[in-house]
Image (tube, rainbow, N blue to C red):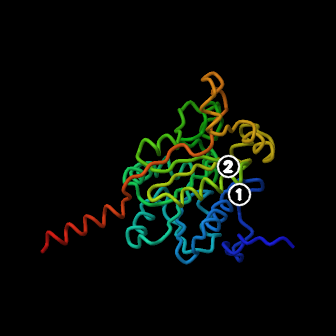
């Protein structure tokens, strides 16, 4: 029997999960706990916060102190937890709709403040839980229940948005590149500040079926064939970056004061002023 040490991080009485067969969310969820194990983070000192959506159901399966919050509000809830106890490791699980639509303002201001959170966005390019509507990250031309002839709204590049807004660690990986995804999340844990990792995951039911992408395995092969490691991507001529190709890897890392440190300084100054 192969020892699966990561199983201790799951609430066994809540399994099996309710995600559709072939969904990539379980892969991303497992990658998070494998990254936690890799970095030796304590279960008792780690909090998982999620919003609403297919991805956000993950917190209910994970054996940590967890918070399943309102739609789009995971980052402000997580900010409050971190400010109340800066010693905690706070992980946010969110989706492309939850994070970049109703939660978009919280996302950019979490980045701007450089709150010490690790935010993992499960990007399945669709609103999966509520019926397959187009999200802010649905690619141009792809179909959804609200875009039956193909989306004409330009999608966000959440990694570029995070970097521009002030995040100090920005990375992307996929459900196909499992060990790479684990490493990208683990790197986020090492960063003292806002860490953002986009995990591209397959949704065979609401997205793949609508866009004739084949089986879940076919969707993962698409990730394999179109993902390009950043070092190789940077060397490609612009014409080869067209189409469905996309980069994965560590996009940005910087050092800046995190929000709870800055807030402590305000408290210290306020105490000095009171004296």
Q: Position of residue 263 (x, y in %)?
A: 31, 64
Q: Position of residue 91 (x, y in %)?
A: 53, 63
Numbered disc 2: secondary structure: loop
Please tell me which residue is depicted at 66% across the width and 61% down the height of the picture. Answer: 29
Q: Earlier in the sequence, mark 1 or mark 2?
A: 1
Residue identifier under label 2? 201
Numbered disc 1: secondary structure: helix
The label on residue 27 is 1
Please state which of residues 122 and 242 is positioned toward the viewer in this rendering. 242
Residue 43, above or below 101: below
Q: Position of residue 25 (x, y in %)?
A: 68, 56
Q: Quadrant of the C terminus?
A: bottom left
Please tell me which residue is depicted at 45% across the width and 59% down the height of the picture. Answer: 192
Give residue 93's quadrant in the image. bottom right
Please state which of residues 58 and 193 is positioned toward the viewer in this rendering. 193
Compared across the picture, whether 197 is left or right of 224 comes to: left
């Amino acid at each position: 029997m192969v020892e699966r040490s990561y199983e201790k991080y799951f609430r066994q009485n809540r399994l099996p999960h309710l995600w559709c067969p072939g969904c990539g969310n379980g892969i991303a969820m497992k990658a998070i706990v494998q990254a936690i194990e890799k970095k030796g983070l304590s279960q008792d000192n780690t909090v998982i916060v999620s919003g609403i959506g297919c991805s956000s159901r993950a917190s209910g399966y994970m054996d940590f102190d967890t918070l399943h919050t309102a739609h789009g509000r995971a980052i402000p809830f997580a900010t409050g937890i971190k400010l109340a106890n800066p010693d905690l490791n706070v992980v946010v699980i969110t989706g492309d709709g939850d994070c970049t639509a109703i939660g978009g303002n919280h996302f950019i201001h979490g980045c701007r403040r450089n709150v010490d959170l690790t935010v993992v966005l499960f990007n399945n390019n669709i609103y999966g839980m509520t019926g397959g509507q187009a999200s802010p990250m649905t690619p141009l031309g792809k179909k959804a229940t609200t875009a039956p002839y193909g989306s004409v709204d330009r999608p966000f590049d959440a990694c570029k948005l995070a970097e521009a807004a002030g995040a100090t660690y920005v990375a992307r990986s996929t459900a196909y590149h499992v060990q790479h995804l684990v490493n990208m999340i683990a790197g986020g844990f090492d960063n003292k500040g806002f860490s953002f990792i986009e995990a591209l995951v397959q949704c065979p039911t609401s997205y793949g079926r609508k866009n004739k992408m084949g089986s879940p395995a076919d969707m993962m092969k698409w990730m394999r064939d179109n993902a390009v490691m950043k070092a190789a991507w940077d060397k490609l001529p612009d014409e080869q970056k067209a189409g469905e190709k996309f980069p994965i890897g560590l996009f940005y890392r910087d050092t800046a004061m995190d929000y709870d440190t800055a807030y402590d300084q305000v408290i210290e100054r306020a105490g000095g002023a009171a004296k």
